[in-house]
Image (spheres, rainbow, N blue to C red):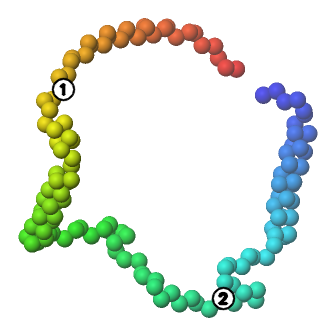
Amino acid sequence: MNWSMPLPVLKLVAGLIGAACVGSFLLMVLTAPPRGRLPGESVDGRGGAAIEAIDATPLVAERIEGAPQPKALTEEEKAALEAERLARAEAEATTRPESEKAQVAVAPVLQTPEAPAPPAPPPPPPKAPAKEEPVF
C-alpha cells in the first residue's frame, strides 16, 4: 500500500498511540474508587444481620419439572359437575324471553353463493441482472 508518511514516522505515531492506551489504562486502575458496598453492608465491611423470612418457601422441584398433573375426578365429582352444568343450561333456557325463543325457531336464512373473484394477474418476469462493477 502507498502510505502518506514515511515508515519511521508511522512507527513513531503507532508507538505514541500505544503509549496513550497503556497510560490511560494505568491511570484508570490507579485512580479507581474503592469497592462499593452491597445492600445491608456497613461501612466497616461487616455484613448485616440475616433477615428471618417467616413466610419464605424454598424452591421446589415444581419450577424445574413444571406444574403437577391435575388429579382425576371421582364419579361423585363428575356427577356433581354434570348436574351443575345441566342446571345452568336449564336456568338460561327459562330466563330467555319468549321473543328470542321464537326468533331462534325461524327457518335458517338462505345464503346466496358469491361470484368467484377474478384470478390475480401473473407476476412480471424477473429482469436480467445488470452487470455489476467492482466496489473499489
In the picture provided, is 27 more to the left or to the right than 94?
Answer: right
> Where 112 falls versus 28 (above or below)?
above
In the displayed structure, would residue 60 be above or below residue 94? below
**Residue under pointer 1:** 109
User: Observer-nearest residue: 41 or 10?
Assistant: 41
Please report the residue visible at 46 percent of the width from the left and 83 percent of the height from the top: 56
Q: Nearer the viewer, residue 133 or 56?
A: 56
Look at label 1 and name its amino acid.
Val
- x then y, percent, for residue 111: 20, 22
| 92 horizontally vs 47: left or right | left
Q: Tell me the residue at 57%/9% (across/down).
A: 131
Q: Where does residue 76 sit, x and y in percent of width and height?
A: 9, 72
Say whether marks 1 and 2 touch (CB < 8 Å): no
User: From the viewer's perspective, is 132 left or right of 53?
Assistant: right
Locate the N terminus and report the quarter of the image it occupies. Answer: top right
The mark nearer the N terminus, 1 or 2, is 2
Pointer 2: what residue?
47
How many dots with numbers? 2
